[in-house]
Amino acid sequence: MSGNLLHRPSILRRPDGIGGAFPALVLIILFFVVPVVGLLLRSVTEPVPGLQNYATLFGDGTYARVFFNTFLVATVVTAVTVVVAFPVAWMLAIMPPALGSIVFGIIILSMWTNLLTRTYAWMVLLQRTGVINRTLMDIGLISEPLPLINNLTGVTIGMVYIMLPFMILPLVGTLRAIDPMTLRAAALCGASPFDAFRRILLPLSLPGIAAGGLMVFVMSLGYFVTPTLLGGTSNMMLAAMIAQMIQSLLNWGLGSAAAFILLLVTMALYALQLRLVGAKRTTGGI
Amino acid sequence: MLLDYDRLGWLRAALLGFTGLVAAFLLLPVVFIVLLSFGSSRWLAFPPPGWTLKWYEELFADPAWLEAALTSARIATMAAILAVVIGLLASFALVRGQFRGRNTLRGLLLTPMVLPVVVFAIAIYAFFLRIGLGGTTAGFVIAHTVLALPFAIIPITAALEGFDKSIEDAAIVCGASPFEAKLRVTLPAIKIGIFSAAIFAFLASWDEVVVAIFMASPTLQTLPVKIWGSLRQDLSPVIAAASSLLVLLTLSLMIVTALIRRKLSK
């Protein structure tokens, strides 16, 4: 199209303004920002004004244990997810499309299946008398059922299952963006496959690994459903503790304070992720 | 060489084997739950001693399940429509607007996706109790629209960024009003993005558990709340039957999505 046509109407150069965002802004401020800020205020005003709720959370060994569990599980889940997801993403990035679309289909099916459905399946699978224990005993690997549920092992298995698609899908994008030529060049120059992996493929995919890993870590920190159902009562994680403080104990002050700590940690890590990859790349699964 | 499928050698076999194992791991619970729902053992023995449809009969005999599913469908449909309309309007501002703080605004609108749901759940629960929306359909729809909004904005802004605005301008040059040009030129061009937004927004509400647990009342329960309640009591095979129907729904949604995407992109 020649530029002449577009010279005249000034209407074309008038960009869309902020106006369209107005309904969204009202919705988010009224029903997201206001409630969350209100909750944070309760953490310093209930039962009496002051920081005593935070003092309780940081001073008590029981709560320290919950924080420790939460960070431990999030760290282990992230590490396992990265290690398992990388080879899969690698294959998906270079597989023939016919084969790849089957694997993609399975990933999407798993990801779109109702969260409770998947967790229920793991509750049954990981039972003392469940399929996994029975199979392991039948082939003689173990003689006693392993305690796979109502502990952090169960939580880790269930969480890795849920997080894998969120790690695999963005990593495929990262790996596809790497020019295969760089690796051919390395091979031509005599690099062994291991050297090429360690010195070229891995460093080039590091931004994707960091972004995906950070997202998995953040999601794991605040996860509620799976830890509650697979973790049992003695190994509580932060989100479950917050829910319990509000729902069962009606301790709004303490619950809000714990929620604020979770919010601060999450937002700090989110900001770090935005720094690392820019706002557009943080969308993971979609 | 490492990124050339045909020249990986033995490494390819190893990586393919590993990928196969992970795919099996991802598929395992989904297939397992469907098989389990037809098994005759109340104690979920596997492989089951026999096959039966009685868990499905029990499921359909209890009107509470159907009612919960209808409640979920109603809330998710309303939340998805609201999220897509509000998200579409916002996307035009986010992609084409030229104002200060555009990235901040984008970040703000996407925050509900990042903040742990449990924090939002107790916040909105407390807020709704105070303003009298607790345990109401309106409250559910509003809370789920907030959570679904980022899932609508992301695909729509992506589609809008890939759309060449000069086509819309051409329509205006040819005499269309700016509104008409958007409606009849731009919207059809980004329909795949809008369609994805609708699916994601619907699923965000349909599968949402945490807010729903706090918001639910004895008279207003969504399907996830019903499943959650049953799970906390026992691991009854009726849950497996309900879960299998949800798997079926996911599968049909995937097929419909694939078909519509193919049709729309023609």
Image (cartoon, rainbow, N blue to C red):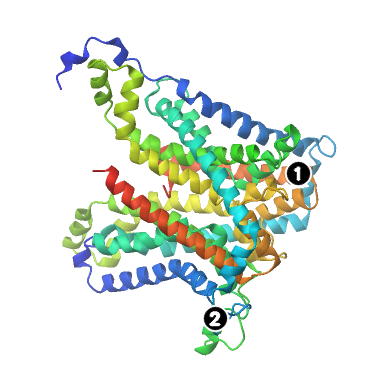
Say what secondary structure mark 2 lies in: loop
Residue carrying label 1: A54
Depth check: give the residue in front, B2 or B143.
B143
- Mark 1 in CB contact with mark 2 (< 8 angstroms): no
Q: Say left or right for A146 vs A43.
A: left
Read off the chain for label 1.
Answer: A
Chain at numbered mark 2: B
- Left or right? Give the position of A117 relative to B211: left
Crowd rating for badge 2 (residues with CA inside 10 Å; few <14, some 14–19, many 20+): some
Q: Name the residue type under label 1.
A: Tyr
Left or right of A216 on screen, residue A241: right
Label 2 sits on residue: B46
Q: How many marks?
A: 2
Whether marks 1 and 2 lie on the same chain: no
Q: Secondary structure at mark 1?
A: helix
Tell me if residue B215 comes above or below residue A193 in the rendering: above
Q: CA distance from mark 1 to mark 2?
A: 48 Å
